[in-house]
Structure formats: C-alpha cells, structure tokens
Amino acid sequence: MLSLLFFLVRCDSGDNNPVDPNNPINLTVETIVYEDKSGIVFIKATADKATEFYFDMGVAGSEPILQTSGDYEHTYKVTGSYNIEVRAYGSNGRYLKKQKNIVVTTGEIIDIEDGYSTPLSYQGMKLTWNDEFSGTELNLQDWSYDNGNGCPNLCGWGNNELEYYRSENSWLENGSFVMEAKEEDYEGNRFTSSKIVTRNKQAFQYGRFDIRAKLPKGQGIWPAFWLLGSNQAQVGWPKCGEIDIMEMIGGKGRERSIHGNAFWDRNGVVDFPASYTLPQGEFHEAFHVFSIIWDEEKIRYFVDDNEFHSNDITTPDKTEFHQPFYFIMNIAVGGNWPGSPDETTEFPTKMYIDYVRVFQKE
Ligand SMILES: [Ca+2]
C-alpha cells in the first residue's frame, strides 16, 4: 500500500513521456447513465498501449476497480452526484486519467400496469369521488398530512408504534402516490414514515371503495387503508367506528395475507376481523385492488374482486356504521401487532397507491 501511494504521488495525471513507447496514450471515456432509475452506469474507456483500466466510482468507502477491460458497469444504490475517475495504465505502470461528474437517480422500477385493476364505472353506481394521483403534488383540498408520533396525547398512536410521520416521506411519481418508511432518527423516533387523511375534507357514507396499491414489505412494516367515523372528535374511539379495508403485517411468511376488520362499541370495544391470502405471490410484488362494498345492511370486503368477509351492520349495536367515514392511509413501523423491524427489514420500503375511488348508488 505504501509503495502504491508513493507511486501515485510520483506519477501525476496525464504524465505522458514520449520517450517511453510503453506509455498509454489517447484515453477516451464514455459514460452512459441509465434513465430508468435502475442506478446503472456504463463506462467505456479506450486507450492505446493500455494494459489495465481503473475505475473509481466516487462512492465513499468503496474500493476502486482495476481490470484489463475498459468496459465497466456499476449500479448505484443511492440517488446523487458522483465524481468518477477512470485511468488507463500502461505496462510500465504509467497512467492517464479522466474525471467526470455524473448525476444518478435511483429507485425501484415500478410498472403501474402490473397487477390487478378495476374499472372507472360500475352499473347502477356513480363515481362520487376519486384521486388518481396523476399530478405532481398531493391535493390538499382533499387530503391532510397527519404528521408526528402521536405525542403528547397518544404517543405511539396507542399501539407502541416506532415511526414519526413526516410530509417529506411521500410524493407523487408516475401516476402513483408514494409513501416511504425509512430508518431515520427524528424527534426521538428511530423511523420516519407517512400518513395522510381526508379528515374534515372528504367523508362518505355507504358505497364501493376501491384502492389500488402495491404494498411495502419487511418485518415490522404495517401498511393500512382504513376509515374512521367523522364524529371521532365528538364521541371518541371506538364509538366513532372504524373500518379497516386493508392491513398487512410485514415479515416472513406474512406478506401473502391482508386483513379486513371493523371496530365499534358494544359496552366496550369489539371487532370482527377476517383475512385473505393470495393464491400465489406476495402483496409487494404487484398492484392489487382492496375494496369494500358498504350499504345499509352490510360491509363486504374484497381483494381483486374476491370477497373474503362480510359484516352484518343491521344489529342495534352497530349504529356507528350508518354515518360518514373519512379515509386514512399510512405505513406504521413496529408496534404491538407486527413487532419491531429487525436485521431482515430493508429500509426504505415504499407503498405505491395508483388510485382511491368511491362509487355510490345512482
Ligand atoms: Ca394513478
């Protein structure tokens, strides 16, 4: 190592002594930065009299590559601006170098067409409200961010959850609303995530509710699409009622199933859960549509139009379910039900929501 350092100091850049016929000459460096968010950068280096090529991709903590071929492909994991250096070495150990700055955007490649989809109309129903997330910013006429960690009133949101919700953890991208849970120390929490609500902006009583989404994954990750009665502030929970269209408890062996539920008051809290398991695959692999069809008599639950649960709401204890409810979408991290993330959990993990639609009887 010491001798290498000495050598690098001695041989400065572009040193091209014409006296030595083994000096490398005519270095060209072409970089191709893939625009598909794969993070792939391809470098083609050529030089005459070169016996080896050196590639420093400008990633802190990672070693440069030395190889005989001038073709090199690198995959960046993190979006950023990188200073790369390419050298061509001659057989005498002398080298030429070129430096470049490249900007790389990374991220999962999401095919919004991949998976199940539902129509924009149903016979006998009209589209009352929808958000297709096709713009560039969340529509704050309909949605609000529900930021924080629940403190001081309900720290951990009553479930010992570990996340702090921030507006920064969600955005619109390619027709989807993207929500991200990540490892980030913030205000005493170990994780940050995203939660939005239509509280005081949009509420609905009865109808068909469709949410098309690709779910996040990982031990301790807890995505949910749910509804609370609009009178929550007046009567509290569970007297306001709660309808859980979809909850998933991330972790090995648990990502093929989602859970539908409802909570209400019957001299104390009661609920009525059920689960649906995909015949194949896991919920993070493609888009699925999570639905309820809620009328005066029952709330029925569906995944990809497969009904898996029905709750009779005509009984006298279920007055909660005959009033308007508002939407909540979030990714909780940790908490009583999923348990904490562990070394198998890959952060960040993202949820992609293609649309939220409400249809009501004509
Ligand atoms: Ca969309």
Image (cartoon, grey):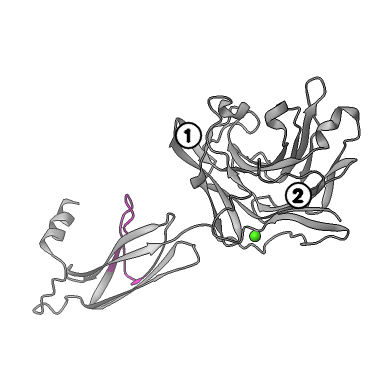
Horizontally, residue 209 falls left or right of residue 310, namely left
Is residue 161 shown left or right of residue 303? Answer: left
Magenta stretch, residue numbers = 53-71
Q: Please, what secondary structure does the residue beneath circle 2 have?
A: loop
Residue farthest to the left? 19
Q: How many numbered badges does the structure rendering display?
A: 2
Residue 132 rendering spot, x and y as whole percentages: 66, 58
| Mark identifier at residue 300 | none
Q: Nearer the viewer, residue 163 or 120?
A: 120
304 relative to 65 in the view: left or right? right
Callout 2 crowding tier (Cα within 10 Å): few <14, some 14–19, many ≥20: few
Q: Nearer the viewer, residue 69 or 259?
A: 259
On screen, residue 341 versus residue 71, left or right, reads right
Which of the numbered marks, if any, corresponds to residue 190?
A: 1
Residue 246 visible in the shown view: no
- Would you say residue 38 sits in the magenta stretch? no
User: In which of the image's four quarters is ligand 1 placed?
Assistant: bottom right
User: Which residue: 86% across, 27% down?
Assistant: 317
Residue tagged 2? 278
Residue 213 % position (x, y): 67, 53
Residue 281: x %, y % from top left? 70, 52
Q: Nearer the viewer, residue 25 or 254?
A: 254
Label 1 vs 2, first from the N-terminus: 1
Above or below for 121 versus 148: below
Element at badge 1?
strand
* 57 part of magenta stretch: yes
Q: For the residue marked with disc 2, what is the amino acid?
A: Leu
